[in-house]
Amino acid sequence: MTRAFITGTSGTELSAEEREFIRSTRPWGFILFKRNCDTPAQTAALTHELRDALGDADAPVLIDQEGGRVQRLQPPHWPAYPAGGSFGRLYGIEPALGLRAARLSARLIADDLSQIGVSVDCLPLADVPIAGADNVIGDRAYGTQPNQVAVIARAVTEGLAEGGILPILKHIPGHGRAMADSHLSLPMVDAGQTELETVDFAAFRPLADLPMAMTAHVVFSAYDAAHPATTSATMIERVIRGLIGFHGLLMSDDVSMNALQGSLVERTRAIFTAGCDVVLHCNGKLGEMREVASETPELSGKARQRAAQALASRRTPQVFDRAAARAELDELIDRLGAASA
């Protein structure tokens, strides 16, 4: 039986201690960062090594590969991709162009990931940024209108699916109003319920059928002034599961981020008490990994069902012409540049 956490690792291959940790604690899945990815051959070997240590050839391996400034796989070994905001600007020129570029970029990213054994991308975003918000979202967002954000996010999801990669919807129920970077401190959002439900949450509702989502470490005082969404039963039950209608696997954003308070044991306990299915720990520090694992239950009940359903929704990759897809994407981005000149 696996346990309800996703763990990072420290480097480009497993240490003996990390292998034993994985064997003994049995995480549900893994997440890679730039520190783990040197070359395609090395990264493919690492994803195999992670699954071998767990004894599960189908264990999910995640990565944040959005394009733009959030791209763990980087040149020269992997191609660069546009930031999400590029798709939004193309959509403003002609909606079909923005949707096509978003789908092409995601399909190409999916091809990169499948070649190295990564099965899940922490994408798409449905955050709707407002003027003056912290730049942690910034040009990663697909626009400032919820309908546009939702349809571009759907196109991204379809591109990933065509390449056999599962999506994670983030950062539910919305990080766009945050005036602080939750990696560094706890953002507080004081907008009213009507505004949140018609803008921020509205971008997530059309995507509520996606198999997995990642929470936002953001306080929404109109609903719960004391806890960020990640550790708020009110936000998870009333907003994420209720108003938005998301019923897939719900994972926390990184439990080690400074937006959360208390020890890692206390944070982990609060995440599960609030109603998250899985806790995410990213930095690869073995001592912290052990703290999180010590407070993580076995994946069971509804959480286990949601996890199984998420993995079962993964499609077989479709054949496509990579060179043609990249040429078309570059042509669309060039068109955006010409329009902006």
Image (cartoon, rainbow, N blue to C red):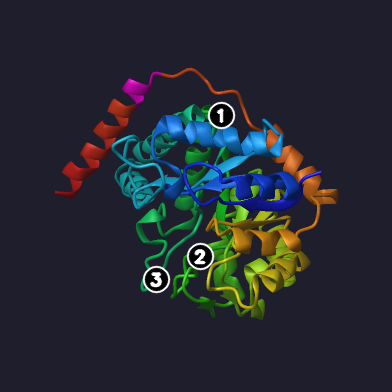
The residue that disc 3 covers is: 134
Element type at marker 2? loop
Is residue 340 visible from the viewing direction of this image? yes
- Horizontal and vertical percent position of residue 297: 80, 57
Label 1 crowd (10 A; few <14 / some 14-19 / many >=20): many
Q: CA distance from mark 1 to mark 3?
A: 33 Å
Label 2 crowd (10 A; few <14 / some 14-19 / many >=20): many
Asked whether disc 2 touches disc 3, contact meaning CB atoms under 8 Å apart, the reply is: no
- Horizontal and vertical percent position of residue 269: 74, 68
Label 3 crowd (10 A; few <14 / some 14-19 / many >=20): some
Q: What's under tag 1, amino acid-wise?
A: Gly
Asked whether disc 1 touches disc 2, contact meaning CB atoms under 8 Å apart, the reply is: no
Q: Note whether 102 is above or below 143 in the view shown.
A: above
In the image, the segment drawn in magenta is 321-325
The residue that disc 2 covers is: 175
Left or right, 70 with reference to 272? left
Query: Which of the pair 214/91 is nearer the observer?
Result: 214
Q: Note whether 269 is above or below 26 in the view shown.
A: below
Query: Which of the pair 227/297 is nearer the observer?
Result: 297
Question: Is residue 207 on the magenta stretch?
Answer: no
Q: CA distance from mark 1 to mark 2?
A: 27 Å
Element type at marker 3? loop
Left or right, 339 with reference to 185? left
